[in-house]
Image (spheres, grey):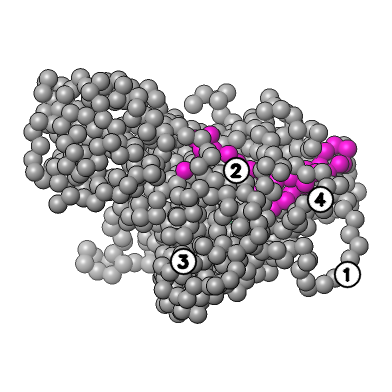
Amino acid sequence: MSDEQKNRKQEQLEKYSTNDKGHMTTNNGQKVSEDEFSLKAGERGPTLMEDFHFREKITHFDHERIPERAVHARGYSAHGEFQVYESLEEYTDADFLTNPSKTTPVFVRFSTVAGSKGSSETVRDVRGFATRFYTDTGNFDLVGNNIPVFFIQDAIKFPDLVHAVKPEPHNGIPQAASAHDTFWDFIANNQESAHMAMWAMSDRAIPRSFRMMEGFGVHTFRLVNAKGEAHFVKFHWKPVLGMHSLVWDEAQKLSGKDADFHRGDLYESIEMGNYPEYELGIQVIKEEDEFNFDFDLLDPTKVWPEEEVPVKIVGKMTLNRNVENVFAENEQVAFQPGNVVKGIDFTNDPLLQGRLFSYTDTQINRFGSTNFHEVPINKPVCPFHNNQRDGFMRQTINKGQVSYHKNSLADNQPEPAAKEEGGYVHYQERIDAHKVKARSESFKDHFSQATLFWNSMSDVEKDHITSAFSFELGKVQSESVQKQVVDMFANVSLDLAKSIADNIGVRAPQSGGSDVTKSSPALSMMNTHFKPDTRKVGVIVADGFKGEDLMTVINELKSQGVQPELISDKLGYRKANDGAEAQIDHTFLTSESVLFDALYLVGGDNESQAFSQSANYFLNEAFTHFKPIGATHSGVKWLENNKMIGKAGVVTGDHMKEFADDFAKAIAAHRHWDREIVFQQA
Ligand code: HDE
């Protein structure tokens, strides 16, 4: 990469990077002559303490771990850039949002919430979507999720929520899952969680890829312009590829087949130049309209329906560089919702207010020091100066005699900046109130938007939500908890509650239901973008295939952005009947249908019975996961044997180019829900 192409953050990080080439040394620089044998008194004698190299190597190893994040421990990151389309000066004087010619470096960390650092990535869970903008006026951290609302309304309840969802303390089970008693006991007894629980049971909680999820700032923030005028704002990230999910059975199987499925997908896409892109959207409400809605703007369990408050698309983020060291970047990044820049301010959302405290505190625990801002990934790209000094692992050598304000000995440096010089001035909201430990009446409607969400779902999405509840509650041991949850969700939809009750064998609620009839089409994943780009197709090939035809289909699919990968019974090359050869990427043993978005069955003249069995297994699994399936030549017989010809999303054809076009359309559709499940024939 040329120097001009490097953004400011990359340039800064490179100063701290090393390739570790050349002679091995100790940490004090002495060259090491031997790294396999410790110093001993005789070849068979005891190890000697004076082996400084041995002591240093072992000690460093013993201290390699830092505490994993209390939540969002399992995550993966990438670097990129953000650019605003047009100046947003009407709303904000944030430098990076007012200058369309400016490219701002970003670092994004995606995560699951409940699981430990080593847990699987395709579990049912909320995904973290934390973005740091390294702006020229300081770091702005938009520490969001892929779900726009939260389980609780006040930060004081966060430890309770997290204790409930984490593995149960007496036996440490289950890992990275909400399908257990304490989580659902929490939900039933803290009913502000109803709306978020609906989202968590929807397909949003099992994304196909980090590249195909929306992101949300969740809280209401304020944008403040140069005149000091404020607007309420909610931030959105909209993935250019649209938002798409796995199916639950597939997600569970993937957990075993590839626990790194999401990070692998992100890493590989960036390596291949398929840079994930997300557009930034804002919803804006004027200060004077604060009380004109049927929900409280400060309540983080509420969305602003996009049909009522449109999302204005204002810029784009492109992730174009992988991390180079997962510990140094992904582990050590220390996000803080309190990292704002002038032009962006907080509101009194009680969840947001609590987060302003928690993140700094948790970083001090993880790093053992308040100096975590000096770690390269956390350093702003603009200069930073103040009179904070010392502490564990301080890196900066602050020169001079003076470390206090005000002073005369150093000409009163560093000195606060006036507003015109970029100084941050908190929005002067007038507060006239009693100190109370209480919650506003306007926060007490827990079910209207949960019903709005339910009403907005397609039939397929409703089925998936019902199944997810039935799975989760089916794992709950306490019948009382099961019953409480069913009764709670009768407030959202009596049909939903009755179906769950029926599935899990508890008494169905007789009354309930909601009089909310509104829906919000933007909430349904059926109304997203559908594209074939970057979709992985497993191509099943045996010896004796038609070489030219296969190349035509593969090239056509590639030209539409699809990524075909060849699967056979062995690695190496398969021979076509016209003498051509195809290199195989995976075997039936090293891959699985769940690793692909679609299957293309080609077969060949010389398939063994074992080959046919494996191909059938892949086909049936992909079919039950509603995946697009294409077949030509001898691959068609597997479809015939399984009575799948003519089913939704099943494409066959004799003309290769036409077939590839039809298949690419089926791939773009993501999943074919109207498919009737056909069970594998004997
Ligand atoms: Fe977090 N959250 N959170 N959270 N959160 C953390 O900070 C916390 C909340 C979110 O990739 C922790 O650095 C409290 C909402 C993300 O590094 C911790 C409350 C939203 C990440 C913490 C919330 C989030 C975290 C753990 C209730 C979406 C991962 C490690 C008031 C808007 C960031 C860490 C990363 C991480 C506290 C609620 C998103 C303990 C007290 C709401 C994406 O500080």
Q: Quarter-wise, where is residue 208 in the image?
A: top left
Mark 3 or mark 4: whose residue is earlier in sequence: 4
Which callout, 3 or 1, points to the residue nearer the camera? 3
- Which kind of residue does numbered mark 1 sit on? His
Residue, disc 3: 500
Residue, disc 4: 292
Residue placed furthest toward the front: 510
Residue, disc 2: 522
Residue, disc 1: 434
Residue sitting at x 31%, y 25%:
660
Q: Position of residue 602 (x, y in %)?
A: 20, 32
- Which kind of residue does numbered mark 2 sit on? Ala
- Which kind of residue does numbered mark 4 sit on? Asn
Q: Is residue 492 left or right of residue 670?
A: right
In reply to whether residue 218 is colored magenta, the answer given is yes
Residue sitting at x 61%, y 57%:
451
Which callout, 2 or 1, points to the residue nearer the camera? 2
The one of 296 and 400 positioned closer to us in this rendering? 296
Say if mark 4 contacts mark 2, CB within 8 Å.
no
Magenta part of the protein: which range?
217-244
Label 2: state its secondary structure: helix
Vertical comparison of 665 with 527: above or below: above
Label 1: state its secondary structure: loop
Mark 3 or mark 2: whose residue is earlier in sequence: 3
Compute the Cα span from label 3 to label 1.
44 Å
Mark 4 or mark 2: whose residue is earlier in sequence: 4
Which callout, 1 or 4, points to the residue nearer the camera? 4
* Residue 147 in view (yes/no): yes
* Residue 378 in view (yes/no): no
Residue sitting at x 30%, y 20%:
657
